Image: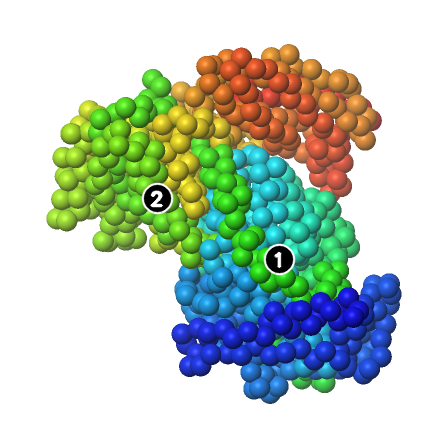
Amino acid sequence: MPKLIASSVLLALAIAVRAEAPATSSAPITLTPMRAELYHDGWIDFNKNGKKDIYEDPSQPLDKRLDDLLSQMSVEEKTCQLATLYGYGRVLKDPLPTPGWKNEVWKDGIANIDEMHNGIGSKGRMGIDDPLGWPPSNHARMINELQKWFIETTPHGIPVDFTNEGIRGVNALKSTNFPNQLGLGATWDRDLVSHIGHITGREGKVEGFTNIYSPIMDIAQDPRWGRTVECYSEDPFLVAELAVRQSKALSEEGVASTAKHFAVYSNPKGGRDGNDRTDPHIAEREMEMLYLYDWRRLIEEAHPLGVMVSYNDYDGVPIAGSHEFMIDRLRKEWGFNGYIVSDSGAVENLNRKHRVAPTVDDARAMFLIEGGNVCTDFSPPEKFIEPLRILIKEGKLPMSVVDQRVRDVLRVKFLLGLFDHPFITNPDEADKVVHSEENQQVALRAARESIVLLKNKDKTLPLPKSLKRILVCGPTAKITETSIDRYGSTGGKVMTLLEGIQNAVGKTSQVDFAQGCEVTDKNWPESEIFPEPPSGKDLDMINEAVAGAKEADAIVLALGDNDKTVGEAKSRTSLDLPGYQTDLAKALVKTGKPVIVVLLTGKPASINWIDRYCPAVVEAWFPGELGGQAIADVLFGDYNPGGKLPITFPRTVGEIPFNFPAKPFSQAPQNKKEFDPNGSGNSLIEGAIYYFGHGLSYTTFKYSNLKVSPETIPADGTVMISADIQNRGDRAGDEVVQLYLQDEFSSVTTYDQVLRGFDRISLQPGETKTVTFTVPAKAMELINRQHQRVVEPGDFKIMLGAASDDIRLTGKYSVTR
């Protein structure tokens, strides 16, 4: 029996099982056998004509296969390859194919199906009980059944690209659950992020997803923005270094990486999200050097096959209707070779929000003409597809444009191997891969590495496990919702901070709990403008916590965010902790007991009072499924924290924009005698609470022996910068060595410091390691007054340190003409 036929028969046996339908369906579903006559030795008869066409022949060159398929396709088929069908519970009403599908628009095919049985139900409800989503082998069989329907039923059998989110692990039921992006950024660990990318891609692949919407490319320059939680960093170099690794890892697992959100999305006017997401006030040079820096590197270095175009405009031109961004930059300048999907609603917004298209149909044509490929929207695909057919007939949408946009989509499907190996041949493998013990250990490692020790006065931490009584307090001590994400793993178990502490001390210490307050008060968010002191039930909760604190030897106070205070469409007017959280901290500090604050936040918090009066502060972000264990490991010294801040913590929202990198003196104090570019000086009301790159350890590190070779390089040369790092303490620890550069003189104003290298290293007590950075002259290119990218000759200052405001070694190198 030929190999492909044999595998097809086995596959048919594998999927010909009965599966109980989700609760919304009234009867069980029987998966159907395959049409064996279509599956031949080494090829599939997609168009069902009994012969091997060029596009069906794996030995043929890609362009010939594309030409052949496009030449056979009807207008109806082509337009179907330009839209997304959102999956069951989102738009699609059927959990599996039905006879009625032959009357739907996708009878002629579809570009992709998004979020099919991924644990997200109607209106975005997460963690739904779905027997076709769990166990993973059921999901794989379901995807096979869907793929089989499109191959065997549509005219040319064009396979579907199964897309899905995947920024904190693949967006599927009970997949491996990692920390949020800002937490992963705090690890400063390229290899870890690569490992996470491989796990995300592998778990997605075995479940049947072929395209993962990841990585996030947005830089978080305004922490009021609700989606700061989804960004790796405010710094484009750090974002690029991690995103390139994530994207490459996904691709190496055989799934497409679709990066988002292109472009200049993360700084809408006033940091406002939701219905705004427009009008970024960013100068052109700043856009090029900051907001497009990571995108340029991602496309040129990782070669992702997908890009999601964003909602916003730039300088009056919506990105989803911009030939300059989607064609000139992405394809011509950077070499993008995949297909572009719209963020949901971005196409219609060309008419309804931006008002650059007189009708919604004009907006649809504009999106395609200006370079978009696939409309991805939470609406039935026929709302996009059927108007396209009319636009073509009326001559408003040229067939040459349609052919090129369809060609991009089909190219990706060929590159993914969907025309050669469209099925999952071993669905049962998914049960062994998804959320394996090995993968869970990586989630624990990620949670540990993400934790940043912000303050540790008089070595308050680590706590001894011999304490007789510990009070765990605060509104985020038992929170799990923030570690279960709309765009990541859903439906799994999350270990809380309270559980982690209880497990860590066992029966050695008595662990008491008092919540103390809610994350938000009853009047929130109005209370951000009209604050009122706690009273009634709120005051009773604080008093209960204070009573418990008086009996404790130490207090672990868990503060931070919930799903109401951070996330998509949840920007804020303040960076202070919401509700009565600071009031709770003040009341507990008055007891005289040591108060260790653990922040579980999705963005920077202006914790001025806590920073001044609490002896120890730990930032744990949203740490994922094993966050409770990771935090406890840090609190009790079983793990030495080594994370560093990927984002600045401003003192007040009134300072914004206050971020990294910054132009010389643009963030200096108002006192003219304090010429400190970081803005710290002697002022207690200006500057940041914690600067970019900040993070403490339970040990100390000595920097020495800076070497620069050669000290003078040409404009196309490379400089080697090295230094010795020694652990001077009595315990092992991680240090993130950070390399900053400064152009000492240039034709245009450049940033006071730019991050151009980092390395997270582990050192045993007394151990010394040499860290070496290879820096091309191009790393310091700028856009000159003639709007040319150049490396100008001159001197460049080298700053090597533990944070942007903690420089240990300095030197310089020169670039000649």
Say what amino acid the circle numbered 2 marks: Thr
Residue 207 against residue 705 in the figure, above or below: below
Q: Where is residue 673 in the image (x, y as percent from the top left)?
A: 45, 19
Of 440 and 200, which appears nearest the observer? 440
Q: In the rendered image, which residue does mark 2 sit on?
A: 496
- The alpha-carbon separation of the residues under discs 2 and 1 comes to 29 Å
Q: Which residue is drawn at 31% across and 23% down?
A: 464
Q: How crowded is mark 2: few (under 14 residues within 10 Å), some or many (20 or more)?
A: many
N-terminal of the pair, mark 2 or mark 1, is: 1
> Is 375 positioned to the left or the right of 536 in the image?
right
Q: Position of residue 410 (x, y in %)?
A: 74, 67
Q: Can residue 209 be seen in this view?
A: no
Q: Where is residue 357 in the image (x, y as percent from the top left)?
A: 60, 72
Q: In the rendered image, which residue does mark 1 sit on?
A: 205
Q: Mark 1: which secondary structure?
A: helix
> Is 636 positioned to the left or the right of 170 in the image?
left
Residue 484 against residue 690 in the figure, above or below: below
Q: Which residue is drawn at 72% across and 28% down?
A: 775
Of 156 and 180, which appears nearest the observer? 156
Colour setup of the view: rainbow
Q: In which quarter of the image is the C terminus?
A: top right
> Is 103 positioned to the left or the right of 629 in the image?
right
Assess whether mark 1 and mark 2 are in contact (beta carbons under 8 angstroms).
no
Q: Residue at x 51, y 51 (%)?
A: 435
Q: Is residue 431 visible?
A: yes
Of 610 and 420, which appears nearest the observer? 420
